[in-house]
Amino acid sequence: MSRVDKFLWSVRIYKTRTDATEACRSGRIKVNGLDAKPSREVKPGNILNIRKGSIHFQYKVIADVERRQPARMVEEYILNITPKEELEKLNMPRETFFLARDRGTGRPTKKERRDMDDLLDSVDFLYDTGEDED
């Protein structure tokens, strides 16, 4: 049995052990559906739920690991059981909307700011769900 933060680092889900520890502390890691502290023990058969961004990965622990493994060996220790719907989110284009200004143009004028506000209000209208804000 090994600590969940050390296990996540050893099987290369996180680049550093500090990143794995921080993910545990912030509630992005669950072991068998329960929030995991960094010191939580992981053993074969456990299901790890890992939230990275908007994607919820699921892995099944196959074997215990003693030290960090080469990338080609990781499949001997974990099995990716993430649902296909979650994996499809990786291929979806990022639907983000932001206003960008050219570098060096300075602060927007009052007219430019009002135009940007009007544009943002129209975008909010497009994504209105009909729910009250209260």
Image: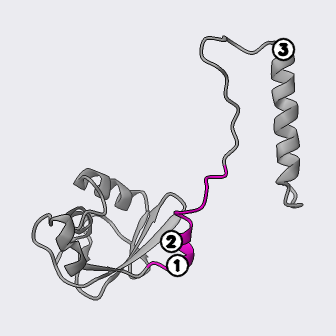
| Residue at figure coordinates x 24%, y 52% from the top left | 16
Cβ–Cβ under 8 Å for marks 1 and 3:
no
Figure disc tally = 3
Residue 38 appears left or right of 127: left
Q: Is the magenta stretch mostly helix, strand or loop?
A: loop
User: Badge 3: few (under 14), some or many (20 or more) residues near its Cα, within 10 Å?
Assistant: few
Residue receiving disc 2: 87
Cβ–Cβ under 8 Å for marks 1 and 2:
yes
Farthest residue to the left: give it. Answer: 66
In-front residue for pair 78/73: 73
Measured Cα–Cα span from mark 1 to mark 2? 5 Å
Residue receiving disc 1: 84
Q: Quadrant of the N terminus?
A: bottom left
Measured Cα–Cα span from mark 1 to mark 3? 48 Å
Residue 83 appears left or right of 60: right
Residue kind at label 2, given as amino acid type: Leu
Q: Over which residues does the magenta segment extend?
A: 82-95
Name the front one of labels 3 and 2.
2
User: Badge 1: few (under 14), some or many (20 or more) residues near its Cα, within 10 Å?
Assistant: few
| Badge number at residue 110 | 3
Residue kind at label 3, given as amino acid type: Lys
